[in-house]
Amino acid sequence: MSDQISPIELEALLQSDSVTLLDVRRANDRESNPNAIQGATWQAPENVAAWAKAIPADKPVVIYCARGGSVSVSVHAALQEEGFNVQFVEGGLAAWEEHLAKR
């Protein structure tokens, strides 16, 4: 499985309701753009060790940050270390919003 998932792939996955979707943007990024991908739960990226224990282990996990960069990469690595099947959205929320605008 690839570490990244495209917005198109995520859209199909979300229709199946078989994924845990997490918004892991930094608080200031979230404040500057309050939009979110429908169905996502926000979790502070700096607290991943604390909240990872509450994620259901029976579903794949998809995370996203503002642009699919360092925040996604670091949270992805932390969740992989905990044994989760995890991917992050290629391009983050910015790519997701661009994808929606093209539909």
Image: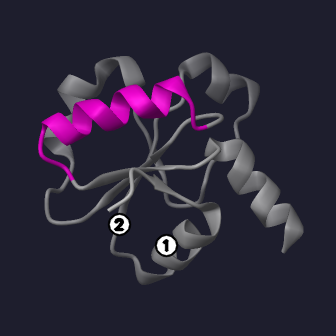
Q: Amino acid at mark 2?
A: Val
The residue singled out by tag 2 in the image is: 19
Please tell me whether residue 92 belongs to the stretch shown in magenta: no
Q: Position of residue 48 (x, y in %)?
A: 28, 27
Q: Amino acid at mark 1?
A: Leu
Q: Position of residue 88 (x, y in %)?
A: 46, 48
| Mark 1 neighbour class, 10 Å CA radius: few under 14, some 14 to 19, many 20 or more | some
Are the residues at dot 2 and dot 1 in contact (C-beta closer than 8 Å)?
Answer: yes
Marks 2 and 1, how far apart at CA:
7 Å
Q: Residue at x 39, y 76 (%)?
A: 17
Q: Quadrant of the N terminus?
A: bottom left
The residue singled out by tag 1 in the image is: 14
Q: Position of residue 58 (x, y in %)?
A: 15, 65
Q: Residue at x 38, y 57 (%)?
A: 2
Q: Position of residue 40 (x, y in %)?
A: 48, 53
Residue 67 sits in which quadrant? top right
- Residue pushed farthest right? 102
Q: How is the image coloured?
A: one colour
Secondary structure state at the residue bearing disc 2: loop
Q: Residue at x 87, y 68 (%)?
A: 102
Q: Main secondary structure of the magenta part?
A: helix
- Magenta segment, which residues? 68-84
Q: Quadrant of the C terminus?
A: bottom right
In the displayed structure, would residue 28 be above or below residue 101?
above
Q: Is residue 63 left or right of residue 98?
A: left
The earlier-in-sequence mark between 2 and 1 is 1
| Mark 2 neighbour class, 10 Å CA radius: few under 14, some 14 to 19, many 20 or more | some
